[in-house]
Image: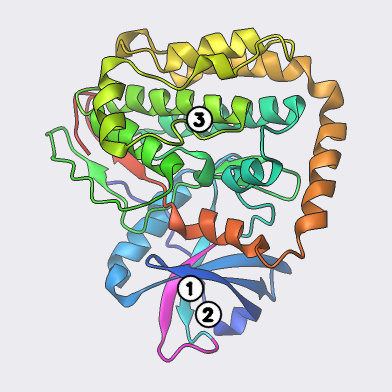
Amino acid sequence: MELVSCTPPVIISDSNLESWTLIGQGGFGVIHRARHKEWGMDVAVKLLHAHSGDCSSLLKEANLMREGGSPFVLRVLGVYRGDVPGLPQASMGLVMEFMENGSLASLLEHRGGPPPWPLAFRLVHQIALGMNFLHCHRPPLLHLDLKPSNVLLDSSLNAQANTHKHQAHRHQTQARTHRHTDTQTHTCVLMYWSVQSVCLYEPLSLRAVLIFGVLLWSIITGEQPYPNAISSLIRFRIPLGDRPDLSKVDQGQAEGLPELVGLMTRCWSPKSGERPSFHECLPVTERVFKLHKATLADAIHRVQTELVLTRHCPCASIGIMWYYGVCIGTLTVYTGTDTTLAH
């Protein structure tokens, strides 16, 4: 069954945008920040290289992403068509919300450790809410590339999952072969790709929960899962039950942390049948977050102050470029029963 959007995506042209600023570029395309004159807000415009796909695939992608409408999932606002200042030819791309505080990956790197506990626990709960929303969709939308660089932070440090991949894939009930051709040198990225690469025998929904468990470890510790490991060794050891180092988690640091660690280990259980669904994760993440909600405002203010002090740094745009395109998420429409699939 094909996913059908009720309304076509909004087409945004040159007449709608002004104050273009280049944020970054790479093999995925070019990212600009621009001001939408009618909306009165800044947006991120992701312009795709000519070889990235045709018009029809871009429109399908925009429609697919608009299906995942949640406060905790990054929204596509429309499709851009026009002539960007400084570029020799007409361009097409996606217009998304501009997330001025970068990604969870850039936040962890900036702080050299985890966020303050109240903020960390809110991020965990919001990510779980976003993933549960996608999985509750009919047919389910399965995010198979959940990692710190794909968790974006708005001006108030709320989390939104970046589900964008230029050509989203629809999974049918038959098996498909997965080829891992990623050449990323970032070990953190490699780890998350490895999780979905080596667990091909598992249902997609349970594989996504495993990846969520690894993400929890990164939020709690502020570290990359296997910073010095060889990628081939990671792929070999994960199916054997190897997981990130639990000794790095001091469970006495915060109230409710032992309960969250318990959830984390259930999420990455080697036995996929023992892993909770995202809906089953919510009571735990909400309960732990509420324990620290009273001090959340102070934690947010502290982190926002840190970010403001570094915003004029020449490297400040790196985090924005990173989360809008270097590490692209995967949003999959799954049609049929949740059987064994390979992506």
Q: Quadrant of the C terminus?
A: top left
Across and down, in percent, residue 47 comes to 45, 72
For the residues labelled 2 and 3, the Cα–Cα distance comes to: 37 Å
Q: Quadrant of residue 335?
A: top left
Q: Earlier in the sequence, mark 2 or mark 3?
A: 2
Q: Quadrant of residue 134?
A: top left
Which numbered disc, 2 or 3, marks the residue closer to the eye? 3
Residue bearing the label numbered 2: 13
265 vs 305, left or right, is: left
Question: Which three-letter amino acid code belongs to the residue tagged 1?
Answer: Tyr
Tell me: residue 310, above or below residue 226.
Answer: below
181 vs 253, left or right, is: left
For the residues labelled 1 and 3, the Cα–Cα distance comes to: 32 Å
166 vs 35, left or right, is: left
Q: Which residues are magenta?
A: 85-96
Residue in the image at 31% along x and 23% along y: 238
Disc 2 is placed on an element classified as: loop
Label number found at residue 215: 3
Q: In this orientation, which residue lies closer to the viewer: 241 or 173? A: 241
Disc 1 is placed on an element classified as: strand
Pointers 2 and 3 in contact (C-beta within 8 Å): no
Asked if the magenta segment contains residue 200, the reply would be: no
Across and down, in percent, residue 9 comes to 45, 63
Label number found at residue 80: 1
